Image: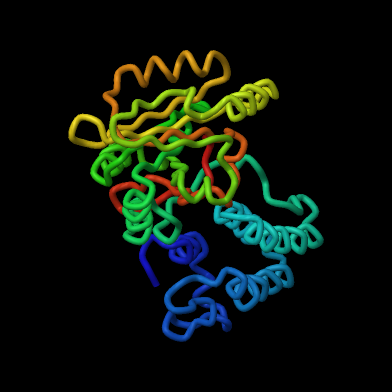
Amino acid sequence: MVSGSRLSKLLEAMPALQTQPEWMPPDRAPWLVAGKLDVERLFERLLLPFLERCIRLGEREIVIRLCSFLDKLVTDSADERLVNQVRKRASQAFPDIAPQVRYPRSSHIWVTDQPSLLDSTNLELVRSALETSKVVFGFHAYYYGGSGGDWWAVTALSDYLDRVHAARPGDLFWVHAPDPLVQAGYALASVQVGPGQRLSSDLLGAEALGQIATHIGTGDSVIFVWWTQAGGGRACGIRELMEDFQEDLDAQFALLDPAPGALYAFRFADLGKSETFLLKAKRPNDAGEVPIGGAY
């Protein structure tokens, strides 16, 4: 069992679980599959029998503590369904217990077995995307930052790592690669330029410019991302715009030398969809832990 994992945190909070007849050591536990926690099996094979035993013994305080801690372990809708199952049964025995997960959660648990920006597999995703798309971009949301955040774009893995390391533990990053988004039909517009050409909003074409203006008219912003090979290296930029977008973009491009590059336009609303993410993960703390939940 990995130190700092959700299971280890649960056992720290509820040590009585290890004294139950259903408990098994990590090498035989059915809720650990190839070293990874199977949450559904954990509930079915350990937590629900423990809950029923506590109810029969009238252990209200233990049940309250169990429900409160399980609330903090919810990472997705499947987890929430399981916790609600526990809470519903607990509320039948003890009516003062809420039958559903309590939001907002009063505190958050930091664990090692949830996606981290610095996981080797996630870094490989970014490295590979930079090779094919030349640029990756996204949104950096601040952990308990009052809904604050900023858009970013990079053309090198070293720049990406610098940005991640400069963030605070718990900060959330959306990471996107433009080429897969274009291929999947999520780009409002895109254009590539060759040697001797300078990026310009006009290169998107009148039809695409009209579609962008129409979309902005709906009240949703447009995210413009570009890269260029100018100056002996690769540079990039990103802007979230809702008005005067051509004037703003062309002022940015006037600072660039003519060189190969590309310009993309995406709907803000699309970039929040799960299927558009290359990666969505948090900056870990020095122990490699990320928080479950949090305000962004």
Name above or below for residue 95 compared with residue 16: above
Along the viewing direction, whichever of 99 and 279 lies nearer the viewer: 279
Quadrant where the image shows the N terminus = bottom left
Along the viewing direction, whichever of 32 and 125 lies nearer the viewer: 125
Query: Taking 35 as reference, is 254 left or right?
Result: left
Is residue 241 something one can see in this rendering? yes
- Colour theme: rainbow
Asked where in the image residue 122 lies, by quadrant, the reply is: bottom left
Q: Position of residue 106 (x, y in %)?
A: 57, 41
Name above or below for residue 126 compared with residue 47: above
Q: Residue at x 65, y 61 (%)?
A: 78
Count how many numbered circles sit on residues in the image: 0
Query: Taking 215 as reference, is 140 left or right?
Result: left
Q: Position of residue 26 (x, y in %)?
A: 43, 79
Q: Residue at x 26, y 36 (%)?
A: 234
> Which residue extends farthest bottom?
28
Along the viewing direction, whichever of 235 and 279 lies nearer the viewer: 235
> Which residue extends farthest front?
196
Query: Taking 99 as reference, is 281 left or right?
Result: left
Q: Residue at x 38, y 35 (%)?
A: 193
Q: Residue at x 42, y 46 (%)?
A: 282
Is residue 176 something one can see in this rendering? no
Q: Position of residue 43 (x, y in %)?
A: 62, 71
Along the viewing direction, whichever of 290 and 71 lies nearer the viewer: 290
Asked where in the image residue 113 lies, by quadrant, the reply is: bottom left
> Which residue extends farthest left?
232
Q: Position of residue 56 (x, y in %)?
A: 74, 72
